[in-house]
Image: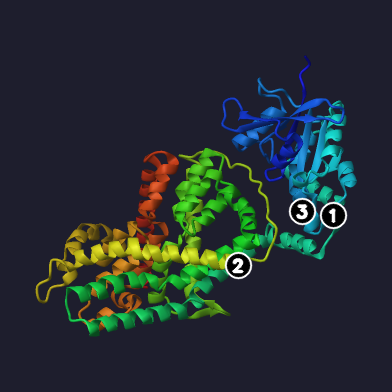
Amino acid sequence: MKAARVAALVGNPNAGKSALFNALTGARQKIANYPGVTVERKAGRLALPSGEPIELIDLPGAYSFDTTSPDEEVTRKVVQGEFSSEAIPDVLVIVLDAANLEQHLVFAQEVIALGRPTVAALNMVDLAERDGLVIDPAALAQSLGVPVVPTVAVRRRGLAELAAAIAEARDGTAHPRPQVTLPERRLLAENIAKGAVLSETAQHRLHAGLDKVLLHPWLGPVILFGLLFVVFQAVFAWATPFADALEGVLVLASDGVRSAMPAGFVRDFITEGVLAGVGSVVVFLPQIIILFAFILTMEATGYMARAAYLMDRMMQGVGLSGRSFIPLLSSFACAIPGIMATRSIADPKDRLTTILIAPLMTCSARLPVYAVIIAAFIPATTVGAGIGLQGLVLFALYVAGILGAMAVALVLRRSVAKGDASGFIMELPRYQMPQLKDLAIGLWQRAWVFLRRAGTIIFTVTVVLWLLLTFPRAAPGESQVEASAAGQLSKGLAVIVEPIGFNREIALAIIPAMAAREVAVASLATTYAVDAPDEEAAAAGLASQLSSRWSLPTALAFLAWFVFAPQCLSTIAVTRRETNGWKWPAFMLAYLFALAYIFAGLTYWIAVAVGL
């Protein structure tokens, strides 16, 4: 009995291949795995107009035959007949997303150049028309040199015409074409897409114009970093009134407790342990909300994916690709979801490098640390039209983290994670206005996470530290911190960090900060509240306490420490889980602590040398 012919659906991810496969084959499907890999193999039977059955294979989504993932490797092997147990397809059916035609035509050219019998299914034409784009299939077919059939798989439109085109193409004569480079295919894809467009709305032209500006190789990065600069200016300029109001509420609460309760253990616990410690972190909630408002807006408008595209060039320079940008950008919120997001990176060395540098992205937990030091030592002045010095310093700290991550990635890709940068192609979502309801829900969720940390981890660590600072009691005239258990425990570490300008209070703060970055602020506030000579000094804000007790070189060294210092224990635990062992988490801890110590020391010594 003669074996049935084989047709294979190929195309980029999200082209609608699976929907088209399901519509063509119905329930006549078999699902298994390709030999030697966990990639799913889906095959079914399609009846041609003549009644002849043909086996239809739904191949995994791919951007190129220059494979960077197991899915792409399977697609290449099937198309080129490299699987001994898999029949080479008689017909290739390229599935194109009509709403994102230019991007999909890049891979289509690579498939057509094989010279095999080929048909193109112009899928989701209804969505393209909804977006204001009407495409001429005949013009597209003439440019590509293969039949083009418009389809809407979910509505079963064009299926009969596609089956007829497959039947006619199966006996076609092969005409291989020379393969061209990726930049050449991209340029040709742009020209083919333009030539196939019959009409487009003003909105579609506007979106295309925005992409020309925002994705420009030189102007695009300037706009991106300009936007980030505005974000960090806003974190200080917009949040200050709200943060001051919260701090005022805490001062009133502390004064109320002191006036309503007699002096003693319970009153000190509430004022020094809870309000001074946990409260010193809560006052930075407005900065957290403003930062996330910008991040969520960038995601909702579709700009975030374009930022990843822009960063691909810089990432290539350090041995990574734009695919690493989204996990690293997620790490600005928290390194834990950022590290987990690296699962989308196919290259194992790319993924390992991204995991190891994710903690260098300045997570939101560092923001309270930066904000309190900047507020204490950097004057709230302007250095130009609308440019605040405090926001400029905050922007510089974030940039320092990014540059540090890029430098470490460059070293890792030439040593323990040696390898070349992988290719990067991604779908660009449509521009759209963010929904206020969605933004509000997202901000509430992140604010709740921050407050929950303040009420659990930070509260617990702060209470434990307060107890260690309170007992044993100091003799008259003796410093309570010096006499306390915490003071005794910090003496050994204080000797180690003294050369880089850190004092005993900082030594006390950096130990519990391993539980959560914000705890450093709570620890300092609690320590100075316990060590205050009187109630008036204890009631003073943390920024006032720091400005009177620390030198500017010490403050700058403290900021440099937190640019590089390892993140919380939860981040280390997630790294262990994602790398299946303690080898890489231990390596991460070692190199981050080394960088933190070195750069804090350099900052302190240089600041002292120049007379700051």
User: Residue beneath label 2, please?
Assistant: 226
Residue 147: which quarter of the image? top right
User: Residue beneath label 3, please?
Assistant: 127
The local crowd at label 3, few if under 14, some if 14 to 19, many if 20 or more residues have their Cα within 10 Å, is some
Residue 586: which quarter of the image? top left
Tell me the SS state at disc 2. helix
Q: Which residue reaches farthest bottom?
A: 259
Mark sitting earlier along the chain (3/1) = 3
Q: What's the amino acid at mark 3?
A: Leu
Q: Is residue 502 above or below residue 109?
A: below
In the picture, measured across the screen, residue 147 lies left or right of residue 316, that is right
Q: Is residue 168 above or below residue 384?
A: above
| Residue 477, position as x, y percentages in the image | 11, 76
Q: Check whether the beta carbons of the residues at disc 2 and disc 1 lie within 8 A of each other.
A: no
Tell me the SS state at disc 3. helix
For discs 2 and 1, the disc positioned in front in the rendered view: 1
Mark sitting earlier along the chain (2/1) = 1
Q: CA distance from mark 3 to mark 2?
A: 34 Å
| Residue 492, position as x, y percentages in the image | 20, 57
User: Residue beneath label 1, please?
Assistant: 134
